[in-house]
Amino acid sequence: MAAAIIAFSSCKKNSDETPESPDMNTAVAVATGDQVASQQFSDVFNISLGVQSSDAGEDVGMGTSAGILYKPGGGEGTLGDQCFTVTVAPKVRGEWPKTITWDFGNGCLGKDGKMRKGKIISIFTAPAYMPGAKISTTLEGYVVDSFAVSGTMTVENTTANNQFGWKVDVINGKITNTNTGFWRKWDATRTHTMVEGNSTPFNPMDDVYKITGGAKASNSNGISWKGDITSPVEWKFDCKWASKGQITFYWDQNPVPATLDFGNGSCDNKATVSYKGYSKEITLK
């Protein structure tokens, strides 16, 4: 699902300071929390659709685990010292549906430097690159660094008229800090439309997606919010973070929205939260 964020260059009283305002502090907490959840499920999306033929016995995924678990490009197969296992049932060419399980055991350091535990389990109705294919993913004891991640993610290949696309739903998503117990619940529906890279379907490195949709969320501090992508978020496969776009947030009974802006297209981990004339730069994890 891949995932979405923003950075907004608006008028501001001071771009380097968060005013002593509970509302501004809440705006930053909401935007940051939304992106923590979005990034975690984007990671699950990339892993679940990234199974390589060397593990599955045939083309099943889209190569989206390059640089996360596998060597970039996928041509050399999995890492020589890989600490995760991939099982496929049935591992019979052309027989569907297939259940694919990534098992990270009690701790597995990925190519991206993240420590993972537990399992990601995905059921494919057909190869992910086929229009109409559906992938349903659940998580079993899944922990990334200090975040326990649970919930269900469904992905449908919505490719039409030679334009590649996905519909991604996160249902009952929950991210819990294993050190503090602080949690965020996150349900989202996103549409990913490829705007660059359609001519090279088996080379994800040149892919650029526009992402639209929204999410509803809450956290253990009692804050509930709704985030809508009001300017399509741009995500490049070769960049970990969104590079353009804007999300608008409303929380509780507050009638004034905050915005999160991802910037001008540069690949970096910075975004800007704006609220009531104030702005605050945040670092995306």
Image (cartoon, rainbow, N blue to C red):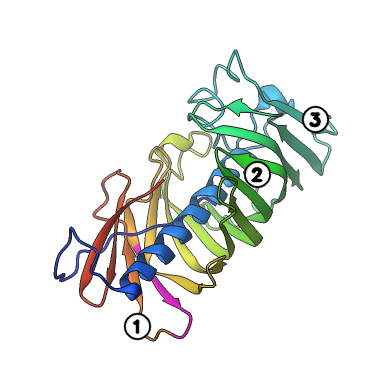
Which residue, given by chain and number where applicable, does mark 1 sit on? Answer: 256
Would residue 157 be visible to someone looking at this image?
no
Assign a secondary structure to mark 2: loop
Query: Up-down: is 45 above or below 58?
Result: below
For the residue marked with disc 2, what is the amino acid? Answer: Ala
CA distance separating discs 1 and 3: 54 Å
State the separation of the CA atoms marked 2 and 3. Answer: 15 Å
Mark number for residue 69? none
Q: Residue at x 79, y 32 (%)?
A: 88
Q: Residue 106 appears at what percent x and percent y?
A: 69, 29
Count of numbered circles on the image: 3
* Residue 230 drawn at (x, y percent): 38, 71
Q: Name the residue under label 3.
A: 93
**Which x, y percent locates residue 57?**
74, 25
Badge 1 or badge 3: first in the primary sequence? 3
- In the image, residue 39 sits, relative to residue 279, either above or below, namely above
Element type at mark 3 = loop
Left or right, 262 with respect to 110, comes to left
Predominant secondary structure, magenta span: strand
Q: In which quarter of the image is the C terminus?
A: top left
**Badge 3 amino acid:** Arg
Q: Which residue is labeled 2 in the image? A: 128
Q: Nearer the viewer, residue 179 or 151?
A: 179
Q: Which amino acid does label 1 sit on?
A: Val
Q: x and y percent of residue 263 in the render?
A: 26, 55
Q: In which quarter of the view is residue 74 placed?
A: top right
Q: Give the range drawn in magenta.
A: 246-253
Residue located 59% across and 58% down the image: 168
Q: Do the residues under discs 2 and 1 have CB atoms within 8 angstroms?
A: no
Q: Is residue 248 magenta?
A: yes
